Image (cartoon, rainbow, N blue to C red):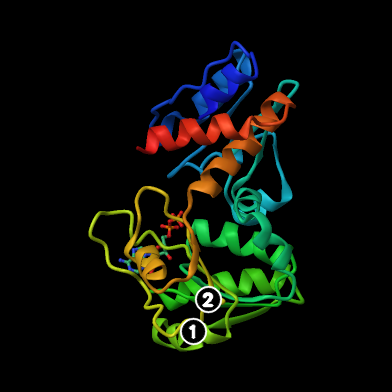
């Protein structure tokens, strides 16, 4: 996706995977400073690990404890997270309807926090959180309430979540259930009304959760748009140019098969 974008923008740049171990993170970042490297993406499990080694980390990324994009400012390495804004951009026209809306998030890990933060920032009215491990949802709720004072955050069990679906405008599936072929749906959507938007952050395959939404005739999105847009935002930070979205989408869909 990034290499296709560089080519389309006539930049003689190369995006390469760097397969490192945790004890090599600091050395890799030092090397980035000395070599003519414009930036980097950081992925699991190093999104949190890189923070102490960066010269500057943007406020939102600090709150998240997660950096997915590193860019340069002179010799300084700066960290940010494009995950939340990438999610919002992937929503297209639904984004305009978020103000004061009500929704449910299943999951309370890193992806859930990035997306919940972005939703809170866009002015949603209330958010219900459900997670297999309730203590983790409680922690996320606390962190959201501290940062977004006017946001109402409710904690629900999975079975309660299924019951409140008729009161929701959208539901976001932010767990890793569905990454593996044959994974079940973490939530039943059978009580949902037809106005519900169903969003699954998983992009690797059609999950049981999303198939359920389709079978029920509910409007739905997968995580491909978020993946595309977080990458497009990284591209824009590195190059100062607008990302060639169509080229990137085509390359991404080709690589995902
Ligand atoms: P990510 O960075 O992708 O969000 P993560 O921080 O490890 O990854 O979070 C994974 C999320 O998927 C968590 O909400 C996790 O629930 P727990 O907090 O209970 O671990 C959820 N998850 C993972 N496997 C699950 C499963 N089999 N059933 C339900 N939830 C699951």
Quarter of the image that includes the C terminus: top left
Residue 32 shown left or right of residue 162 in the figure: right
> Which residue is pictured at 40% across the width and 33% down the height?
254
Where residue 150 sits, quadrant-wise, is bottom right
Disc 1 target residue: 156
Q: On screen, 157 above or below 11?
A: below
Q: Earlier in the sequence, mark 2 or mark 1?
A: 2
> Which residue is pictured at 36% across the width and 70% down the height?
215
Disc 2 target residue: 129
Is 128 in front, or is 50? 128
Viewer can see residue 90: yes
Q: On screen, 65 above or below 71?
A: below
Report the disc number at residue 95.
none
Ligand 1's quadrant is bottom left
Is 15 in front, or is 219? 219
> Which residue is pictured at 69% across the width and 67% down the height?
120
Viewer can see residue 77: no
Locate residue 25, reporting x and y percent: 48, 31
Where residue 73 sits, quadrant-wise, is top right
Mark 1 C-beta to ligand 1 under 8 Å:
no
- Residues at badges 2 and 1 in contact (C-beta under 8 Å)? yes
Label 1: which secondary element: loop
For the view shown, which residue lies furthest in the top direction? 12
* Count of picture labels: 2
Residue 187 shown left or right of residue 86 in the figure: left
Locate residue 121, reporting x and y percent: 73, 62
Is 166 in front, or is 218? 218
Residue 196 shown left or right of residue 79 in the figure: left
């Amino acid at each position: 996706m990034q290499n296709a974008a560089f080519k389309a923008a006539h930049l003689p740049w190369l995006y390469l995977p760097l397969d490192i171990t945790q004890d090599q993170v600091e050395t890799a970042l030092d090397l980035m400073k000395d070599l003519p490297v414009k930036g980097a993406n950081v992925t699991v499990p190093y999104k949190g690990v890189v923070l102490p080694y960066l010269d500057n980390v943007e406020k939102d990324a600090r709150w998240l404890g997660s950096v997915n994009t590193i860019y340069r400012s002179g010799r300084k390495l700066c960290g940010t997270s494009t995950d939340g804004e990438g999610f919002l951009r992937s929503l297209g026209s639904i984004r305009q309807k978020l103000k004061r809306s009500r929704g449910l998030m299943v999951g309370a890990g890193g992806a859930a926090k990035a997306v919940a933060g972005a939703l809170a920032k866009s002015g949603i009215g209330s958010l219900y959180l459900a997670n297999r491990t309730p203590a983790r949802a409680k922690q996320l709720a606390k962190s959201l309430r501290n940062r977004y004072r006017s946001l109402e955050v409710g904690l629900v069990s999975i079975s309660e979540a299924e019951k409140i679906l008729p009161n929701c405008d959208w539901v976001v599936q932010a767990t890793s259930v569905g990454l593996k072929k044959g994974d079940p749906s973490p939530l039943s959507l059978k009580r949902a009304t037809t106005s519900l938007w169903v969003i699954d952050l998983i992009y690797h395959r059609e999950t049981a959760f999303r198939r359920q939404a389709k079978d029920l005739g509910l409007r739905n999105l997968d995580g491909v748009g978020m993946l595309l847009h977080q990458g497009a935002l990284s591209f824009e930070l590195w190059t100062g140019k607008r990302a060639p979205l169509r080229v990137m989408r085509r390359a991404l869909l080709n690589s995902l098969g």
